[in-house]
Structure formats: structure tokens, C-alpha cells
Amino acid sequence: MLKPVLILCCIAFVVCSATEHEWHKFKALHSKRYRSPSEELLRMKVFMDNKKLIDEHNERFAQGLESYTMKMNEYGDLTEDEFQNMYLGLHPSAALRDSKKIATFIPPYNAGELPGTVDWRKVGAVTPIKNQGQCGSCWAFSATGALEAQTFRKTNQLISLSEQNLLDCSSFNEFGNSGCKGGLMDNAYRYILENGGVDTDESYPYEEEYNDCRFSNETIGATMASYVPLTSDDEDELAIAVANVGPISAGIDASHLGFRYYSSGVYYQEDCNKNRLNHAILIVGYGTEDGLDYWLVKNSWGPNWGDEGYVKMARNRNNNCGIARITSYPLV
């Protein structure tokens, strides 16, 4: 009887040692430091729980039961509540739309003849992946990304625009945003319209926190004439816009662990809530992979997240994660 018990104990020791090794690698890779031994024990427990979920998911992927893979990243020691409070900052209820400044989307006459694949990165309309850090400023990154692309299409110049300008100057005032506590792309567009432009990222760099407004007319990187909201929940119209207009700002439900630890494949989450949009992203294309339609999405969590900063999200699957619920783009 002792031999089986001894074998089980040895297996448990090996598994525990391997997991502890992964923990030390994680801390070193992401320069993690904790205030006390008790906090480190808590963070290690959270990490182990998250790693277990990732490993179980990837086993299901290997069995053909999932359409995407997951990987550990810098968020591995955060609980769900902590992560959502730090990184998810879309506030759809903050909408302050002014009908005088809104244009109407009119599909082109040949809109039915869409290409099978669109990727605006390939023509140079998309800036490199950015990182919002521990600040719920995703709305600002989505807004600048769309305006950067539209400015490129008009001028053939790709200029990185200032998220910090939007964070500081369209928050806690008549424009309705709330700095690192969240906001909405349309409110950022309203600010840019009334302000007469937004500064370049070079002149007004990102600071990962809300500060006093320091906009300068001398360093404007882009202006806009209006903005266009698309029809809510219409993936067909969204595809027409992505193909013919360019990258589109959108909101999604990003609260699930599958999104947080996404690595590759086409992300589909059956439990996504279309009525709980909490993260802003930029749709820069679409396509089909292994028979699965997807939206090509630029995130703002740095190049080490996901597929070098990008995620392929399910397309034509009943508006999964609400990706077509709140969509818009600027006119320049």
C-alpha cells in the first residue's frame, strides 16, 4: 500500500515544484515585487489558479473543443475584480452625443462586393501597439487609433496622436469622460471637434494618469470635421465600414479570462454579455481563419499581450461580446 502512496506524493511534489518554478519565472519576467511575504503568498495562489484555468483551456483546444489558445501574461497575479478595475474603462452610459456634430453613415453603391479579407496595417494606416498601463483609458486609445487612420487616409502621413491630451482635457468637464476611471470614444471626438484638434503623442506623451490639461495649438497632430456612429448591433454594416472607411472604434465585453489571457486563434466567448460593454478597442480589419470569421482587433495592452497586441474576435456569431453594439469613426 505504501508504494502507490509514495508515487502519488512524488508526483504531487514534482507538480508543485514545477508550478513554483513557473511562479519565479513569472515574477522575474514581469519584475513583480510585493509588500510582504503574506501578499506574495496571496499573489502566488491567484497565479496558480489562473495558470490552472489556462492549462485546462489549452487542453480543450488541443481536443478541438475551443477555437483559441490562452497564455500567461503580466496580469496573472490579479484577481478578476482587480483586473477589471485597473484595465477596463469603457463607459457607454457617459454618451453625450450632440446631433449637430454627428454625420450619417452612407454605404457606397458597391457595398455588397466586399473583399474576403481586410487588414489596414498592410497599407500603413495603423500605428504600433500602445500600452494604456494601469489606467482605464482604453477609450482614448480607441479614439486616437481611429483618427490616426483617417488622417493617414487623407494625408498619407501616419501621425501618432496623444491619448494623454484626451485623458486630461476631456475628463471631469462638459465632455463627460472620467480620466483613468473610464470614458467613451464619442465624447473624445466631441472634445477634438470643439477644441480644434488633438496634439501629437510626441509633444504630449502618455503618463498613465490624469493630469491638468496642457493642450497646445502649436503641436496639433490631427483635426476632424464630424464623427459617424454606425447602426447598433449590425455586423454587416460594420464590415462595410471597415472595408471602405478604415479602422473603427468599438466597445466590447472584455471581462472574461479568455480575453485577458488570449494568445492565438479566433476568440469566441459564449458567456459574453452584449449589455455589459466595458472595454474600448479598434477594429482594423476582418477575415476568416480555419473556417471561422473574425474581426481583427487592435488592443491597448502592449505588444506582449495576445498576438503581438492583437486579437481575432468572432465575427458573424450573433454579435459576440457586443462588438457591433457601439461603433463609430471620425470624419476628417
Image (tube, rainbow, N blue to C red):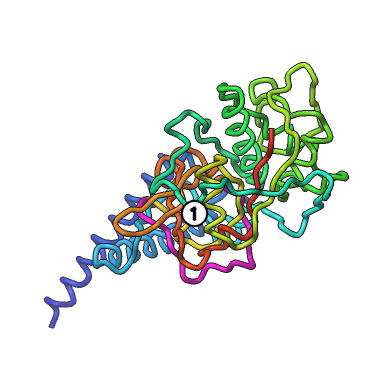
Q: Position of residue 256 (x, y in %)?
A: 51, 63
- Whether 88 is drawn above or below 153: the answer is below
**Magenta-colored span:** 264-281
Question: Toward the viewer: 217 or 117?
Answer: 117
- Whether 152 is drawn above or below 275: the answer is above
As helix, strand or loop, the secondary structure at mark 1 comes to loop
Task: Say which residue appears at 47% left-offset and 37% top-offset.
Answer: 120
- Horizontal side of residue 15 vs 331, given as left or right: left
| Quadrant location of the N terminus in the rendered image | bottom left
| Quadrant location of the C terminus in the rendered image | top right
Q: Position of residue 176 (x, y in %)?
A: 82, 49
Query: Which residue is outermost to the top?
Result: 218
Can residue 67 be seen by looking at this rendering? yes
Q: Position of residue 147 (x, y in %)?
A: 64, 35
Label the magenta part by its dominant secondary structure: loop
Question: Toward the viewer: 107 or 95?
Answer: 107
Query: Which residue is outermost to the front?
Result: 109
Quadrant housing residue 84: bottom right
Amino acid under disc 1: Asp
Q: Position of residue 22 (x, y in %)?
A: 34, 50
Quadrant housing residue 329: top right
Q: Which residue is mark 1?
A: 77
Task: Say which residue appears at 57% left-offset and 41% top-offset.
Answer: 245
Question: Toward the viewer: 195 or 4?
Answer: 195
Quadrant housing residue 12: bottom left
Query: Which residue is outermost to the right?
Result: 174
Query: Which residue is outermost to the bottom?
Result: 1
- Whether 168 is drawn above or below 53: the answer is above
Q: Residues within 10 Å of mark 1 (few under 14, many from 20)?
A: many
Question: Toward the viewer: 178 or 160?
Answer: 160
Task: Say which residue appears at 56% left-offset and 47% top-offset.
Answer: 109
